[in-house]
Amino acid sequence: KQEVTQIPAALSVPEGENLVLNCSFTDSAIYNLQWFRQDPGKGLTSLLLIQSSQREQTSGRLNASLDKSSGRSTLYIAASQPGDSATYLCAVGEYGNKLVFGAGTILRVKS
Amino acid sequence: GAGVSQTPSNKVTEKGKYVELRCDPISGHTALYWYRQSLGQGPEFLIYFQGTGAADDSGLPNDRFFAVRPEGSVSTLKIQRTERGDSAVYLCASRQTSGGWNEQFFGPGTRLTVL
């Protein structure tokens, strides 16, 4: 059974800092990996999707990498802003593209 | 519509009652998913529809849970004899299935509280 772990569980950084969120998964037979952002009381907003054949994806200040063989992904956020404060969820896509989620990293960016 | 919509946004019910939660996916998305998210955890898969049929219902916790998608668009998640442990946020997502494995788009969720 696929298990997804996210480290750290919570992170507090000053504005402007670059930061890395980590995600690991136990079964490398995945179709893709998706990073989401969730604001309190809200649904999920898709940030980046990496297909299993890809190594990384970039969108603005965000960069996500995927190392399928080692079961790891990282989300890099450059020049963090208070508006980046949210919970970040990593999810791996299995057959049928059903997603298996980690518990998330709660990020707080202090101004 | 512009995005995935879910109704109601909040539902409070009493233990033992029946509830229905509705999901309206993005127009043209043939794949539809239901997830359940408990406080402090990531969402957990419940069921996946491809068109009108349930392609994978392995995440439904027991036979009190049932979901339908009769016309391949709107889906309803039905919970019979609700229990306090069913309290959670129920999320719906849809995905376009042409052109490979595409990202899932989520609705805002329905917060279910069973008293």
Image (cartoon, rainbow, N blue to C red):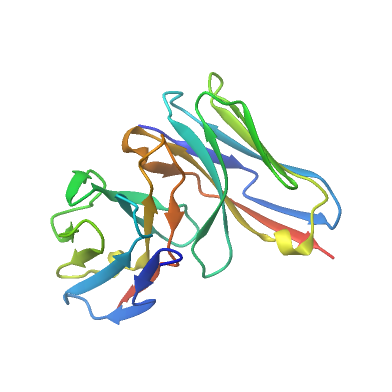
Image-quadrant location for residue B83: bottom left
Left/right of residue B105 with respect to residue B7 in the rendered view: right
Q: Nearer the viewer, residue A26 or B46?
A: B46
Q: Quadrant of the C terminus of chain B?
A: bottom left
Q: Nearer the viewer, residue B17 or A68?
A: A68
What is the x, y in percent for residue A10?
66, 52
What is the x, y in percent for residue B90?
35, 63
All told, the count of numbered labels is: 0
* Residue at x 50% of width, y 27% of height: A52
* Residue at x 33% of width, y 68% of height: B87
Image-quadrant location for residue A82: bottom right
User: Where is A80 relative to B97, above or below?
Assistant: below
Q: Nearer the viewer, residue A34 or B103?
A: B103
What is the x, y in percent for residue B29?
34, 52
Left/right of residue A2 with respect to residue A54 in the rendered view: left
Q: Quadrant of the N terminus of chain B?
A: bottom left
Instruction: Name, please, the residue furthest toward the top.
Output: A69
User: Where is A7 relative to B36, above or below?
Assistant: above
* Residue at x 39% of width, y 76% of height: B9
* Residue at x 38% of width, y 49% of height: B95
User: Where is A96 relative to B71, above or below?
Assistant: above
Left/right of residue B70 with respect to residue A84 in the rendered view: left
User: Where is B55 relative to B24, above or below?
Assistant: above
What is the x, y in percent for residue A61?
75, 47
